[in-house]
Image (spheres, grey):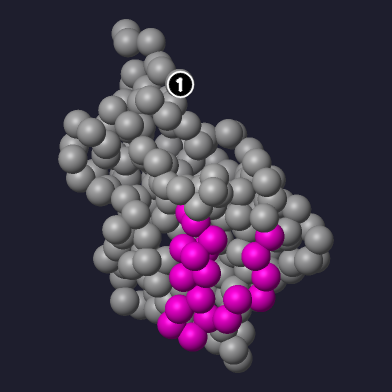
Amino acid sequence: MTVPGDGVDDARRAQAATGDATAWFEQLYAASAEGRATVPWDNAAPARPLVEWTSAAGIDGHGRRALVVGCGFGEDAEHVASLGFETVAFDVAPSAVRGAAERHAGSAVSYVVADLLDPPAEWTHAYDLVLESRTVQSLPPALHERAARNAGRFVAPGGTLLALAARAPGDVVGEGPPWPLTRAEVAAFALDGLDEVRVDDLGPLGWRAELRRAP
């Protein structure tokens, strides 16, 4: 058995091996399932900026729908569902979706395979809360605006997009993946009728952007 690397190196090797913007996710998750790699963003807990935001805002999801973008192994999705949301969570990698369903057996979350760059049309303006946590930054910079726009299109009238991302030091993007977001790229989530409510610079925890669509 190959000893797993530090996660970031495993991700970069997978991306280099496929030469594809999204196919490397499946390679990484499949290798992780076999014990040959480590998924660097798998912290086995929901993202701290998400938990702090939902707690401070007193978010109550009962009677509302949520969509989690690039769900990975589902920790963020489970947190969102625990707030009462009817939750759909998707990932482009089938191995990630299988892993999430296995890790959270019996969960109320609907885990599905889908592509942020080519999402189902029926998801447009369909969700009261959309969580995009460090998915856009895992794509090459040339795809950031397209991915951000697609994430925003999921938000229903009166709904909210919460976007979490690593912060590009000095607004300089280096070698990836990941490709942390600049402040200008964070602002680019305010597309397709979304308005920026606030953007928090959380230092080492990166950006937390809250955007809303008018009712």
Say which element carries label 1: loop
Locate residue 145: give its quadrant: bottom left
Q: Quadrant of the N terminus?
A: top left
Residue 86 visible: no
Give percent across and percent down for residue 68.
Answer: 50, 59
How crowded pointer 1 is (Cα within 10 Å; few <14, some 14-19, many 20+) is rated as few
Q: Is residue 178 left or right of residue 158?
A: left
Q: Nearer the viewer, residue 44 or 117?
A: 117
Q: Which residue corresponds to mark 1?
A: 6
Give percent across and percent down for residue 166.
Answer: 54, 47
Q: Amino acid at mark 1?
A: Asp
Q: Nearer the viewer, residue 121 or 47?
A: 47
Q: Quadrant of the C terminus?
A: bottom right
Q: Nearer the viewer, residue 202 or 134?
A: 202
Q: Could you tell me which residue is drawn at 60 percent across and 76 percent down?
A: 196
Q: Which residues are magenta?
A: 181-200
Residue 136 visible: yes
List the single residue furthest toward the bottom.
Answer: 215
Is 196 magenta? The answer is: yes
Q: Is residue 52 left or right of residue 66?
A: right
Is 18 magenta? The answer is: no
Q: Could you tell me which residue is drawn at 40 percent across and 72 percent down?
A: 149
Q: Nearer the viewer, residue 53 or 19?
A: 19
Q: Looking at the image, is 200 positioned above or below residue 37?
A: below
Give percent across and percent down for residue 86.
Answer: 57, 66
